[in-house]
Image: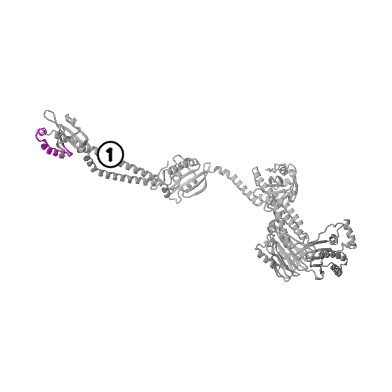
Amino acid sequence: MMTMDPRPGGSDAHRPAGPRAGPGARRIGRSFAREIFLLQLVMVVLLVVGAVAALVVQQQRSTTTDARHRTLAAAESFAHAPGLVAALDGPDPTTTLQPLAEEVRTAAGIDALIVYRLDGTVLTHSDTSQIGKHLIGPYAEAAEGKAFTRTFNGALGRSVVSAVPVEDATGAVVAIVAAPVTLESIHKSVHHELPVFLVGAVAASALAAGCAALVSRRLRRQTRGLGPATMTRMYEHHDAVLHAVREGVLITDDTGRLLLANDEARRLLDLPADAEGQHVDTLGLAPGTAALLASKRTADDEVHRSGDRLLSLNKRPTSPTGEHGTSVVTLRDTTELRALAGRAELARSRLRLLYDAGMRIGSTLNVVRTAEELAQAAVPGFADIATVELQDPVLHGDAPAGASTVLRRSAVAGLAQDHPLYPVGKLIDFVPGTPMAASVREGRAVVEADLAASTGWRSQDLERAQQILDHGIHSLLVAPLQARGVTLGLVNFWRAHTSPPFDEEDLAFAKEVGGRAAVCIDNARRYSREHAMAETLQRSLLPRELPAQEALDVAHRYLPAQAGVGGDWFDVVPLPGARIALVVGDVVGHGLHAAVTMGRLRIAVHNFSALDLPPDELLGHLDDLVARIDDQEGEGPDSAQVMTGATCFYAIYDSVAGRVAAASAGHLPMALVGPDGTVTFVRPPVSPPLGLGDGLPVEAVEFAVPEGSRLVLCTDGLLKARDRDVDLALDALAQVLAGPARAPEEDCERVIGSMLRTRPTDDIALLVARTRLLARDRVAEWDVTSDPAAVGPVRRDCARQLADWGLERLSFGTELILSELITNAVRYGREPVHVRLLLTDTLVCEVSDGSSTAPHIRRAADTDEGGRGLFLVARYAERWGTRYSARGKTIWTSQSLTGEDASADELSEDDLLGQWDDL
């Protein structure tokens, strides 16, 4: 049971566990001491009130009894007084007896002394008005000679009356003497004493309340203001600590005296039954334990021996400030925990090793590097030596055909220079019966705890096996590398010298780390395969060599990103009329999808370029195409892989006019480097990236370009490499390009060397083109009137021009082409009609008119007079086509200068038409 400290304020040594009482506790509800005080106060008040009531009743009863005695004595003394009978027989008894009756009344302290005859006539009375009247009352008993005392209502009110008969000498009753005392008189006497009673009651109540307050104050200090429910709960907690808690609890004072010990502490320390109250030195404890209990220092998980037990002790003062000078000590048995500590520490180290392995393995998407990380992660925390063998297809990014035992050693860790194991790169064919072959075939981990006692693994190479044993290697654990149900290879863990042999508990770690590494190796394999496919695809999609042309001197660079191939591309597309298109595009993302998207866009640009569209119209058609493709692919399972995010810059350079027309779909501006070395950026009106135009028109810009200028187009990977704002990166690019005239190849080298510090994180496409102008002597032009007769002079002028250029052998075919085209323009077109010959690497004939209607080649019927002219044009020209402009159209043809079509010159027009008929 819990005892109270006799000192003021009590002691915390025996205070049950629970919240410390404070002002908040008193505000929450009545404390136990207050309830006791109120109970005592109520009891005192009730006792005082009861005592006062009892005294009043007793006093009333005593006064009534005294009144009975006095009235009876007065009535008897007056009834037996000498001369009373004579007076009654006298002529005026009232005169004689009234004075005597008043004297007796006054002396006896009664309210009246009444003498009346048997017939009720009143002879004497304190109220003289009643004399002579007949009295009615219960006096029949007195008339019969018996005296009595009774309470009844009379003339004076409710009174106590004693009646005594008056007898003559013969004994006959001649009159009755009555002595009444009113109850009012009796109560008045009691009321006179009531204040004394009340004063005594108040004094007694005050004294009792003061005593109760003193007791309550003392009790409140002892209970610390706690309420009954809290005290009950604390007692329950205290009882639980003493008997139910499975952790030892001791409370000691600052002198080393044991104040409290629960059952568990008694069991753990083997304490005697009377241990409480004794000094700890007398309890037979270990010296170190006794010294700790007797000291004032604190302790945290100190281990002490008690018999065959190992106890963990914690010591703290019972109050934060230590004001009570007592301490609480907790003890728990750690004997079993110590037995488990080694295994727990081993498991913790394995978890740490597994975590580190998970962080280290798979840092790159390289198969060999991942295998090396696996071997390095296991050494030296798990094994002394680790080797990794993989199937050859895995090393090349292919999926293995099956669980083959022919593996190539790909990584080792922990080996010395003179090791006896197979070196890296060795192709090993593990023979049946070895742990390696069993692990591959069965897909399970195999432990060879003692290699010296095992014979299966020796069958691989008897001589090398003995060298391995001589090297100190004594234990082996083999784990398969399996991912997605396919065995990719093996990992071998070896232990040597003083390291403990592998056991069954090591299998779990080997399987876990092998499984994680296998997934990383498989991811690297799949990435290598996809990367190789993407690179192959991208190499096939990008231009292998630029087309031969005379308008520009072009150089280019393409650098794939560190993460792999991406969607950046460039192109140089020759156009009719000594023009050439420069294209640079960028598809967001990397990998196979980006490469495929780039190829689709490049093919689309080539197809639209074949239509000879201006830059703004071409990008508008390309935007519509990308939007349609996005809509179609957005409905499939691969809806996330769409083209949205591609940008493109398209520029057409006209080497005859020396002008450039350019348009941009969300791409970086083109840099224009003048012959004097000044750099400006061509910024066409801003248009959104491809697929996001929502049908809005793309605007183009056109400007003149001096000969010898350089046109520089690039993708944003070049600017991102500078890790700065785009405008600042463009300024840096301008500084690199500025300066004296340089060859495009030299510009490419300078830009890449200056703008890149490390391998780029995004693809880089760079295109540098130096402009040339077609010489004026290689351009011939004529204006033609709307008259069929004008065809002849133009043909003759054309023949003379070809003779000047040394192209007489092309004269017949060229004249025939011009005749057909000029005739069509005059007959079906509108003015003005213009003819132009351009001598580049081919001979270009152009006929322009103001009409937008273009002829189409078709098969003419036998009865048709026309429809065969374009057939002749197509027969003599290598290529022909139509391009439109704001002023009309231009029909152009291109003829080779090599003379491959000379055989056509030997045929007449009738022969050619005959060929058409044969078709």
Q: Quadrant of residue 664?
A: bottom right
Q: Nearer the viewer, residue 542 or 356?
A: 542
Residue that extends furthest to the top in the rendered view of this protein = 170
Q: Considering only vertical position in the picture, is 639 above or below 177? A: below
Q: Residue 565: in sight, yes or no? A: no
For the residue carrying disc 1, how many other residues have a C-alpha within 10 Å: few (<14), some (14-19), or many (20+)? few
Residue 211 point in image, percent of width and height: 33, 45
Q: Nearer the viewer, residue 328 or 769?
A: 769
Q: Nearer the viewer, residue 100 or 114?
A: 114
Residue 521 point in image, percent of width and height: 70, 50
Q: Quadrant of residue 135?
A: top left
Residue that extends furthest to the front in the rendered view of this protein = 863
For residue 105: magenta? Answer: yes
Query: How is colour applied across the structure in the image?
Result: one colour
Residue 428 point in image, percent of width and height: 75, 47
* Total numbered circles: 1
Q: Is residue 138 left or right of residue 434?
A: left
Q: Amino acid at mark 1?
A: Ala
What is the quadrant of the C terminus in the image? bottom right
| Magenta span of residues | 85-113
Q: Is residue 789 left or right of residue 101?
A: right
Q: Which residue is mark 1?
A: 54
Q: Considering only vertical position in the picture, is 624 above or below 383? A: below
